[in-house]
Amino acid sequence: GRHQLRDKLVKLLKLNIGVEQCVSSAYATAEYLKQELPNGGHVHMIGTDGLLKEIEDHGFSVFRLEDAPSQMTHKEVQSFEFPQEQFDAVVVGHDTDFNFRKMTTATNILANNPDALFVATDVDSHDVIGDNNNHIPGNGPLVKCLESSCQREATCCGKPCKTLAELIQKEYGLEMTRCLFVGDRLNSDIRFANENGMKSLLVMTGVTSAETLISFKEGTKENPLPHYIAPYIGFLTL
Amino acid sequence: QQKKNGEGNTSSRPRVHVIGSSGLCEELSNSGFDISGGPSPSATASPGMTREELAEYDFSEHPIDALVVGHDTHMTFRKLCIADNLLLRNQEALFVATNKDSFDLVGNDSRHIAGNGCTVVALEYASKRTAINVGKPSGTLVDLIRSEHEGCMDDPSRCLFVGDRLDTDIKFGVDNGMKSLLVMTGVTTADMMIRLGEGSDEE
């Protein structure tokens, strides 16, 4: 959520930033829900405590599976009592404890509530962590998984989707042409910036290596080239 | 079985990492492969996998020749992480799906259960690699039947394929020159049939 994002940025950049200056994917998702469901409603979610708090703070009641075994056999699915109440939305956010039971619960809730919104906080494919450059699957794989099981397409509230651009313009009155978007990912950060009238700056300290960048040549629709490139964010202060 | 051993493999058996049931693991093991992974998570490891744990994990200790994904009602984030990284670090390894069924219906009141296809698309999206699908509607099954049962399917037009799924069963029948019979006791409903009208390439 926004508070965790603010704390992280204050520590990293040593800047004094207010929570209201931060827009996280959790916040954007909750704002989108409020926009589509102005009278509130009942939401099923997969994801972090941060996401849960943002959604609740925006006036929704939330159901999230807690402390349940990860496995769910065919036999159990046949007799299980899935939540029967009406749901207005199903939200998928990143979960390092995603499992078959969560997959099955969300699928059945979506099937039983065909008019409910199906929303993803973002569709990042992966992140790179640790000295071994290991991959951690992002929210994107979880979303694709559920899109397949319920045969529906999710609305993405994160980069590179328009939803987020519209949100920040409306809430903060930002003039897109006067914005510089800094990120490490071509298919989300840079694409988001370029498709919404901002300038984009790619930093090389994240998932995109020089090799990857070169392999995209003049760029593609999915992976456009940035307006600017810097080896690391601190380069701007030199 | 046609795959050569990877470099540095001291065992004579190719190494296959598996997401799937014990039945799948047994079948593979009996066919001469060294298996890792499988349905039961480690007794000590949690089903989830934190960023911290994944950052420390050493995948170089785990070379593989193939990764097979089969249906697993105990699919976890940990299994997804391990499979994703193995695929990335072993680019020459085969990436195989037993099938790409998206979902199934169980019980009298049609509960949804995610199919193997869900895990496969998740892994394809994460790894940016495409799985080889040996399940319907792939022709692999036809080749297998022909190689194991001489004379069978010499004339596919004399075969009737019965199934409940348009995008796998019926497509398999049609693509391989067989007659196809759709039963209405499975995932395909009358409403779906009516909506499809003349049918499309996939269905």
Image: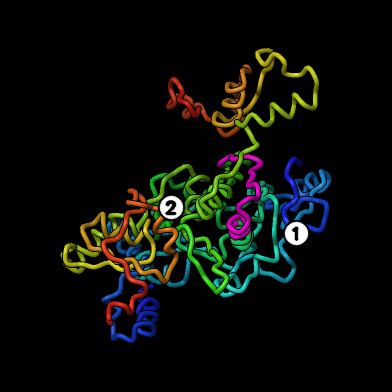
Q: Nearer the viewer, residue A142 or A70?
A: A142
Residue B119 visible to the viewer: yes
Asked which quadrant contains residue A231, the reply is: bottom left
Q: Is residue A152 magenta?
A: no
Residue B49 screen position, x and y as percent: 60, 68
Residue type, label 1: Gly
Image position, residue B58 (x, y; %): 65, 69
Query: Observer-nearest residue: A188 or A224?
Result: A224
Residue type (three-letter) at the residue carrying disc 2: Gln
Task: State the image quarter where residue B82 is shown.
Answer: bottom right
In the image: residue A17, left or right of residue B187: left
For residue A94, above or below residue B200 = below
Q: Is residue B139 above or below residue A58?
A: above
Q: The N terminus of chain A is located in which quarter?
A: bottom left
Does dot 1 land on a helix, a strand or a loop? Answer: loop
| Chain ID at mark 2 | A
Vertical comparison of B24 with B74: above or below: above
Q: Which residue is mark 1?
A: B8
Magenta stretch: residue B100 in it?
yes
Could you tell whether A60 is left or right of B32 in the image?
Answer: left
**Residue at image point 72% right, 15% down:** B154
Residue annotated with mark 2: A86
In front: label 2 or label 1:
1
- Residue at figure coordinates x 44%, y 64% from the top left: A209
Query: Can the viewer see residue A83?
Result: no
Tag 1 subunit = B
Q: Left or right: where does residue A93 sit relative to residue B184?
A: left
Say which quadrant the C terminus of chain A sits in.
bottom left
The span picked out in magenta is B84-102
Whole-percent x, y for residue B144 in the image: 73, 29
Q: Position of residue A45 (x, y in %)?
A: 46, 61
Q: Residue at x 82, y 56 (%)?
A: B11
